[in-house]
Each structure stands twice: as structure tokens, then as C-alpha cells.
Image: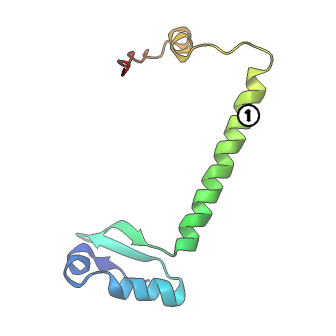
Amino acid sequence: MTAIPISKARLQGVGSGLDEVLERGARVPITRRGKVVAYIVPAADVESLERAEDEEDVRAAEHAIQLQGDREPRPFRDVCREEGWPVPKRRARHR
């Protein structure tokens, strides 16, 4: 895997990294001062990750619905008070 320093990416663009991604499906790291700060990745990788995140969100929502059971919904502020969490401030309503 070929890393591209951010300074080189800025000067030369990311064309060579994109070629690697498009031709071989490689994941190309972008580095700053020797540390990886980003990657150029195939779109399919990002789409797959987004699908997995969406599926996890659905599972979490279904689990929350099961935990709720027959109980009546309660305002989030009340739950915060009961759990000893910081109570969010009310936002001003726009008219």
C-alpha cells in the first residue's frame, strides 16, 4: 500500500492515488508528518460501511422498541433527571 504525504497530495493532486484505487481497488493512505490522516478508498468500501451502519441502527432501534414494551414514552429530559445525567437546555423555538 503506497502512502501519499499530504504535502504531495496538495501539490500533485490525488491522481496517482485515485488510479490505484480505480485500477486495483487499493486503499491509499494520506499522511501528514508520517501519520495516516485519511484514506482514498473505493466507493464500494464506503457504501458497504454505510450499509453496515444502517443495519446496526435498525437493530438498535428495534432493541429500544422491545425494551420500551408496553410502557408509555417519557420525555428525554425526565429520563436524564432520573438517571442523574445532565439535562439538556431547551432550545428557543423559531417562529
Q: Between 22 and 39, which is closer to the camera in this rendering?
A: 22
Please give left or right for residue 71 compared with residue 13 in the image.
right
| Residue 23 higher or lower than 65, as above or below | below
Is disc 1 surrounded by few (<14), some (14 to 19) or many (20+) residues within 10 Å? Answer: few
Residue at the extreme front of the image, as rendered = 95
Which residue is at a point 35% across and 18% down the rendered structure image?
A: 92
| Residue type for callout 1 | His
Label 1 sits on a secondary structure element that is helix
Q: Position of residue 78 (x, y in %)?
A: 54, 10
Question: Residue 1 versus residue 12: which sits nearer the camera?
Answer: 12
Q: Position of residue 94 (x, y in %)?
A: 36, 22
Display colour scheme: rainbow
**Figure quadrant of residue 6:** bottom left
Residue pictured at 37% horizontal, 66% vertical: 38
Q: Residue furthest right?
A: 70
- Residue at 74% x, 28% y is 65
The image position of residue 54, as x and y in percent, is 63, 51
26 lies above or below 79: below
Residue located beneath label 1 in the image = 63
Q: In the rendered image, which quarter contains the N terminus?
A: bottom left
In the image, what residue occupies the spot 39% across and 74% down? Answer: 29
Quarter holding the C terminus is top left
